[in-house]
Amino acid sequence: MPKVQLGGPVINYENHGTGEPLVMIAGLGGDLHSWRSMVPALSKDYRVIILDNRGSGQSEAPPGEFSVADMADDVAKLLAHLGIRRTHVLGSSMGGNIAQEFVLRHPDMAHTLVLLSSYARRPDRSGVAIDAMIRAVQEGSSLDTLQTMMQCWCLPEHIFDGKNISRMPRQKVLSEPERAFFEGFTRQKIALDGFDSRSRLKDIKVPTLVMHGTADIMVAAHHGEEMAKAIPGAKFILVEGVGHVFTPNKCMDDVLPFLRSHPING
């Protein structure tokens, strides 16, 4: 997988397919592997660029705090490095925050915007939950605990039918890769705490599709609906039974027609 450093952290990324560019931005703690299930369908018609956000996967997190705006600028620098002047943008959850910031900070580079399970300001309930997960690891729980708790918040109820997740492993010392993941996760969460696009949504001028699941308890669907109402001309689609994480069969039938209806070179 190629990596590039452009006046900031080393960013890990991949290219798939040919055609109009589509950059896909993952959520909190996620990396480019978050998109593996969607890339095959999208890369048939598009040049899909996926990346590890700073602090995730194989991308670096430079010392000190960083913001959602910094992560959006990472995306812009990567695209410029790849010679991409204009692109479709898709982000999920925190990736949707980065995508919003990208469109607002680099409007000439954005052609369309797709937001999955995202929001304009972090919901208080999810913030409290994630802070509790972070404290659990700081106090000696394993990363398995954090990941299991995230799954409980992000996946629909039927996923857990018949499963016993009451026993979570504990460990006193994180391995080096686990520590790097946890530090990146924590710093991304701090960046999210400072994000608020509510007063700026009116300035998003590109065609926008907002999708949310009815079973999302991490970010309730009304956050997506309110965001769509504030973005001029945005389309909102509520999908029955979907939790915080969309799978291809729950969104491709809407995402692909939306992208095709707004060709960059049309």
Image: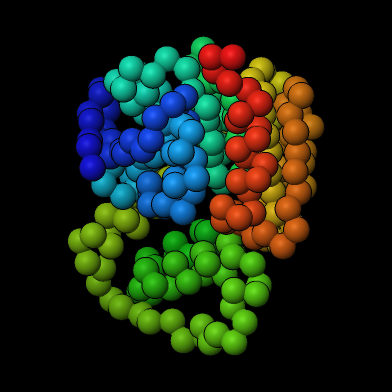
Query: Residue 2 appears in which quarter of the rendering?
Result: top left
In the image, residue 114 lies at what x, y percent?
A: 60, 35
257 or 213: which is nearer to us? 257
Place of residue 179 in the rendered image (x, y in percent of width and height, measured from the top left): 27, 60
Residue 11 or residue 122, whichever sits in front:
11
Work out which quarter of the rendered image holds the N terminus and state it: top left
Q: Horizontal placement of 99 versus 51: left or right?
A: right
The one nearer the camera, 45 or 85, is: 45
Residue at point 54%, 36% (across, down): 90
Q: Residue at x 28, y 36 (%)?
A: 11
Task: Reply above or below: 238 against 195.
Answer: below
Q: Is residue 89 visible?
A: yes
Q: Residue at x 36, y 38 (%)?
A: 16
| Residue 38 in the figure: left or right of residue 207 | left
**Colouring scheme, one of rainbow, by chain, secondary structure, one colour:** rainbow
Q: Splitting the image into 4 quarters, where does residue 104 fall?
A: top right
Q: How many numbered dots are placed on residues in this image?
A: 0
Give the percent coordinates (x, y) of residue 262.
63, 23
Q: Which is nearer the eye, 199 or 17?
A: 17
Q: Is residue 180 left or right of residue 253?
A: left
Kindly tell me whether residue 66 is visible in this rendering: no
Rendered view: 136 above or below 76: below
Q: In the picture, which quadrant includes the C terminus?
A: top right
From this view, report whether residue 230 is shown above or below residue 256. Answer: above
User: What x and y, as percent, mark residue 27?
Assistant: 49, 47
Residue at the spot x=59%, y=74% of the render?
159
